[in-house]
Image: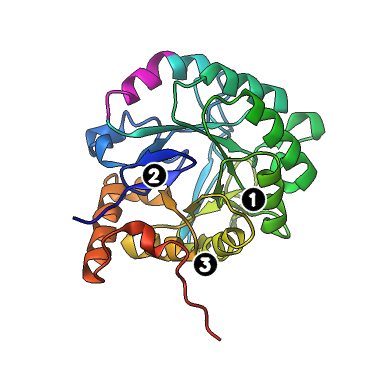
Amino acid sequence: MTNLSVNIAGVTLKNPIITASGTFGCGREMGQYVDLSEIGAVCVKAITLQPRIGNKTPRIAETPNGMLNSVGLQNPGLEHFIKYEIPNLKKYDTKIIANISGSTIEENCIIAERLGDMVDLIELNISCPNVKEGGVAFGTNPDTVYEITQQVKKHAKVPLIVKLSPNVTDITVIAKAAESGGADALSLINTILGMRIDINTRKPILANNVGGLSGPAVKPVAVRMVYQVANAVKLPIIGMGGIMNGDDAVEFMLAGATAVAVGTANLIQPTACLDIKNELLVYLNNNGITDVNEIVGKVVLNK
């Protein structure tokens, strides 16, 4: 029997497949197509303190081997999540990861405090803009990353995952700042800032002009960053960025990820998470590996 279970900061997942925040909602719609109990964890769409209607449309644009999004954290707010979504998710035998995206450090602390232990893990989105600092993303400055991690950690009753932005010069500096601030785990990468222009109107396709690039196009960058971070910190890593099949998941785990999050693939195929889990199992069996943890960080570098 092949062991697929992994441990993220003391929380055991039955398998290393997680839904990436923003691509799976809170599981209600996707639950019509896939048994959520077969997924290691469901990371829900970003939660803000108050409801948000998000950005103007169009806010999705396809690109070669990927997509741009500028949804703008649309969600019904914290209290709706607690009242309606948590009870629904608890019907399933899966772990719940709450992605929190406050617009200030204080808001993130309030959300973490209010969630208590109703979820299994909290993922802190530091790619969102800090309104008190003129809209600059929390995650681009190591001092700010340290501060927000340290403050939210004080209010979190469950392990804290810090989700790193790739839109920085050296992601290992940011990762070390999060580790120093008390993060229990890291997830990476978030989307890469991108743009598309309609050559006929000469205007950006997205109403917000720019958006986050995800999908297979970002995978080589994501694998590289996961490898670098895995060798810079001692925290468990959730790798993500263009994972479309089991081989992609294996690649991230060889680079140093303990678990992987599937995002854009869910928008193409609702059963993507289960398909990837099954393909990962086939790889392990074909290579005589009885424990998925045996491949974590086992990339063999060229000399």
Amino acid at pointer 2 = Ile
Amino acid at pointer 3 = Pro
Q: Which residues are magenta?
A: 83-92
The local crowd at label 3, few if under 14, some if 14 to 19, many if 20 or more residues have their Cα within 10 Å, is some
Name the residue carrying label 1. Answer: 203
Q: Is residue 174 toward the left or the right of residue 100 in the image?
A: right
Q: Nearer the viewer, mark 3 or mark 1?
A: 3
Name the residue carrying label 3. Answer: 220
Amino acid at pointer 1 = Lys
Q: CA distance from mark 2 to mark 3?
A: 20 Å
- Residue 35, placed above or below residue 158: below
In the rendered image, which quarter is residue 130 located in?
top right
Q: CA distance from mark 3 to mark 1?
A: 29 Å
Residue 213 in picture, x, y percent from top left: 55, 53
Q: Nearer the viewer, residue 246 or 301?
A: 301
In this picture the colour scheme is rainbow
Which residue is found at the position 79% from the left and 43% from the top?
A: 143
The local crowd at label 2, few if under 14, some if 14 to 19, many if 20 or more residues have their Cα within 10 Å, is many
Q: Nearer the viewer, residue 11 or 170?
A: 11
Which image quarter is the C terminus in?
bottom right
Of labels 2 and 1, earlier in sequence is 2
Q: Is residue 77 toward the left or the right of residue 244 in the image?
A: right
In the rendered image, which quarter is residue 278 located in?
bottom left
**Residue 168 magenta-highlighted:** no
Name the residue carrying label 2. Answer: 18
